[in-house]
């Protein structure tokens, strides 16, 4: 059962939505979600892995593999869930589409908090219908090493409902999925950058393994 079916009838729910490619999910995502839960007194967090992008570019792992890693990474936290909405439902490709869908399915008083990192929120004007999105949810923008949220006020200047964007200071973790994919490609350990279960799954499923010719000489990816 998708967690949304379980949560949609909960009265007064404050629901955090953490969108991302999660290719793979890492400790930066988990810490960000946990901080949002604590700092904004949320009840539950739903991780929402993106579906297959229209143009396959950077992404390496399939939606199913990314969903599985997110499920494994969040399994031990009773307030963390993973939804298949963006993976399974055609036409839910943008955050605003997802929020429309959530509003349609949940009780009217449910409050939604969309959680992003600094890099993502600084691009908010390029998102689909940012103004309407800010009428559908509050946005929580987490600090992230390498991205200056000092620029945010300027970015939001002319955006209606900009008071619905909140900056959240979190313990700095200079970790990214791209960095993890790079390390795996080089045969380096990713231990402690992803959860143990995710590291095991990556190793076991040969996710992110390069063609033999390129990985020769390195250790097996994921064997932290
Ligand atoms: P990639 O390097 O492939 O872009 P990523 O680490 O940025 O991967 P995403 O799946 O793109 O991960 O990010 C999902 C969300 O999590 C985004 O809003 C992003 O800003 C946020 N995020 C990712 N890593 C961190 C981090 N270390 N600190 C704070 N926020 C983060
Ligand atoms: Mg990213």
Image (tube, helix red, strand yellow):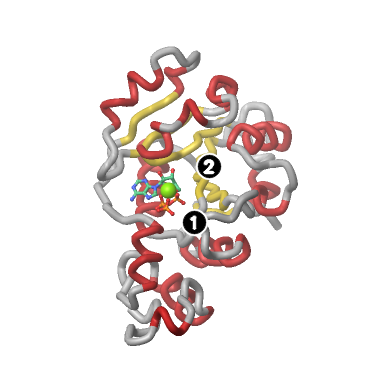
Quadrant, the N terminus: bottom right
Q: Nearer the viewer, residue 46 or 58?
A: 58
Local packing at callout 1 (Cα closer than 10 Å; few below 14, some 14-19, many 20+) is few
Label total for image: 2
Residue 170 marker: none
Q: Secondary structure at mark 1?
A: loop
Q: Nearer the viewer, residue 197 or 59?
A: 59
Q: Quadrant of residue 198?
A: bottom left
Q: Nearer the viewer, residue 213 or 146?
A: 213
Frontmost of labels 2 and 1 is 1
Say whether disc 2 or disc 1 marks the residue closer to the N-terminus. 2
The answer to whether 59 is drawn above or below residue 198 in the figure is above
Task: Residue under label 1, please give it.
Answer: 58
Please indicate whether residue 52 sits to the left or right of residue 139 in the image.
right
The answer to whether 34 is drawn above or below residue 14 in the figure is below
Q: Residue at x 53, y 35 (%)?
A: 14
Q: Residue at x 42, y 25 (%)?
A: 165
State how far apart marks 2 and 1 are (Cα): 23 Å
Query: Can residue 44 be seen in the rendering of this structure?
Result: no
- Percent of width and height locating residue 185: 38, 72
The answer to whether 86 is drawn above or below residue 184 in the figure is above
Determine if the C-beta at disc 1 is less than 8 A from ligand 1: yes
Local packing at callout 2 (Cα closer than 10 Å; few below 14, some 14-19, many 20+) is many
Q: Residue at x 68, y 41 (%)?
A: 92
- Percent of width and height locating residue 180: 36, 64
Q: Secondary structure at mark 2?
A: strand
Task: Residue under label 2, please give it.
Answer: 17
Please indicate whether residue 172 sits to the left or right of residue 32 in the image.
left
Please indicate whether residue 63 sits to the left or right of residue 105 in the image.
left
């Amino acid at each position: 059962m998708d967690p949304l079916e379980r949560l949609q009838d909960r009265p007064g729910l404050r629901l955090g939505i953490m969108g991302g490619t999660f290719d793979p999910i890492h400790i930066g995502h988990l810490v960000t979600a946990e901080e949002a839960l604590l700092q904004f007194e949320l009840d539950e967090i739903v991780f929402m892995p993106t579906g297959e992008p229209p143009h396959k570019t950077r992404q390496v792992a399939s939606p199913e593999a990314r969903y599985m890693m997110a499920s494994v990474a969040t399994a031990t936290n009773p307030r963390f869930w993973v939804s298949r909405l963006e993976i399974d439902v055609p036409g839910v490709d943008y955050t605003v589409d997802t929020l429309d869908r959530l509003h349609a399915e949940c009780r009217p008083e449910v409050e939604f908090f969309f959680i992003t990192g600094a890099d993502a929120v600084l691009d908010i004007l390029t998102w689909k219908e940012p103004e309407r999105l800010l009428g559908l949810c509050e946005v929580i923008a987490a600090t992230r090493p390498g991205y200056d949220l000092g620029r945010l006020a300027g970015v939001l200047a002319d955006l209606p409902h900009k008071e619905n964007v909140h900056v959240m200071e979190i313990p700095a973790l200079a970790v990214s999925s791209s960095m993890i994919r790079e390390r795996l490609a080089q045969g380096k350990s990713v231990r402690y950058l992803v959860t143990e279960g995710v590291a095991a799954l990556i190793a076991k499923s040969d996710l992110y393994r390069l063609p033999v010719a390129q990985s020769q000489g390195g250790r097996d990816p994921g064997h932290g």
